[in-house]
Image: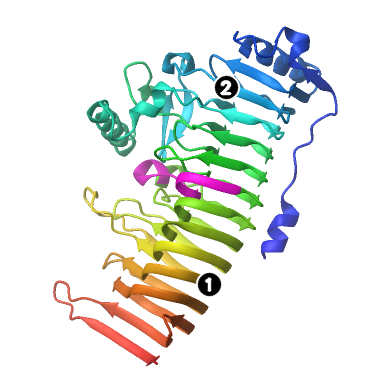
Amino acid sequence: MADDIVARIRLPDIPPAQFDITDFGARPDDGRDDRPAILAAIAAASGSGGGRVILPAGHWDSAGPIVLRSHVELHVSEGATLLFSPRAADYLPVVRTRWEGTMMMGYSPLIYAADVEDVAITGKGLIDGNANSEFLGWSGHSRDALPRLEDILRLRQMGEEGVPVGDRVFGEGTYLRPSAIEFLGARRVLLEDYTISNSPFWVNHLVFTQSATVRRVNVASHRANNDGIDVDSSSYVLIENNHFRAGDDSVAVKSGRDRDGREIAIPSEYVVVRHNDTRGGDGIAIGSEMSGGVRFVFFDDNNLQRGKSAVRFKGSLDRGGVVEHIRVRNLAVGTFDTLFLFQLVRGDETDGRFPSTYRDIFFEDVRADRVGRFMVVYAPYAAPLCDVTMRSVSVGGAARTFDVENVERLNLDDVMVGGRHIDGTLSWRPAQGNDAEFAQWDGEIQ
């Protein structure tokens, strides 16, 4: 099925015409704002039916966002650096975006495209969000932590109350950071070859996007909440041969948060993630914003070097949503705090009426050096983790093996942890209300 998915993904159709930004007044290394020339080149390409906008080798400055149009490729040539302004005010007026799973009007991503088709960012140059960016001071540990938390809670309350998106305005005087690159409502997207650093928030963000290819991208951004790539309510996505050095999840698949995500109800589906090399906070992740559902995701032949959790699947008692038909195989893992983490109860729930459901998940041919914990499951009583199979899994050593709560049919086939061979099926739910504890183990440990 993964091969069929890849065969259905289409690359963007972009005419061969070229538009060099120096023909529109840009000059390298002069310290002036090159954004007007870049936007003029994009407008000219779009006006003539499309083409490649070229940033030649050299240093280019942009005092604000680069907004892409249909049938346009932004090519950051090898030896070129595109440096964005450090001033938050340069990324106003607000645009329609999705922030941690909730739709809103917020600061523009550095490179942004909405409701477009046949678009690309390519080239072996550097896209730099700026180490001096004001956005980088808006993380949870900054002096603006309390106003930022208030903004987060206000946005989530708006999503829960169904406030119209146009009225969810978070501009000047607010502290919600934008993604570095965001495509929203796009069709046929290519992200290829560039290096990106100093992202304000999530690095590459695909929202409501169909048919996208992300390959040979080098993420070198260790800032707070720097996910390498977020697939968000998007379908037919190929992520391959990338190099992720990220501050948070390297690859995350999402689909909206709580009521807002459930009502939009667009899943992420038909996603293939293969041949990637990661190091950072977590390796591969699903959620926690997965209220629209996630299904048919294939992780194949990835190398996760070190970090907090190699595989981290997240949910909440407020999210709802179903995650199913997930396949992970040929996974090479170095040293992580936790190998498999299912964090489906997070502790920040409000009324807890919409537990997330995770089921039909298959791991095969996983090799890990050493981990602190082999498998941790915190699942809700009302929606236990169901039908997880681990086949041919080998771990050199683990300080703890299982820490699980609320699982049904955890199937272990040829699992080796620290020299101990484990085969069998485990189901366990603690006593709750009038229900007695249920525990069943059918297998052996040698």
* Depth order, front residue of 250/183: 250
Q: Residue furthest left?
A: 434
* Depth order, front residue of 106/73: 73
Q: Which residue is mark 2?
A: 83
Residue 255 within the magenta-colored segment of the rendering: yes
Q: Considering only vertical position in the picture, is 94 above or below 36? A: below
Q: Amino acid at mark 1?
A: Arg
Residue 242 within the magenta-colored segment of the rendering: no
Q: Considering only vertical position in the picture, is 379 above or below 401? A: above
* Residue lying at 22% horizontally and 47% vertically, measured from the top left: 350
Quadrant the N terminus occupies: bottom right
Q: Residue 126's spot in the image, x, y percent?
A: 63, 31
Q: Considering only vertical position in the picture, is 19 above or below 151? A: above
Q: Specify whether 379 is left or right of 99.
A: left
Q: Amino acid at mark 2?
A: Leu
**N-term mark: 1 or 2:** 2
Quadrant the C terminus occupies: bottom left
Query: How many angstroms separate mark 1 from mark 2 (CA)?
Result: 40 Å
Does dot 2 land on a helix, a strand or a loop? strand
Judge the density around disc 1: few (<14), some (14-19), many (≥20) Cα neighbours within 10 Å. some
Q: Specify whether 293 is left or right of 74.
A: left
Q: Which residues are magenta?
A: 243-261
Q: Are marks 1 and 2 in contact (CB under 8 Å)?
A: no
Q: Main secondary structure of the magenta part?
A: strand
Residue 406 in view in this figure: no
Q: Specify whether 77 is left or right of 353.
A: right
Image-quadrant location for residue 421:
bottom left
Q: Considering only vertical position in the picture, is 232 above or below 438? A: above
* Depth order, front residue of 23/426: 23
Q: What's the mark number on residue 367?
A: 1
Q: What's the mark number on residue 125?
A: none
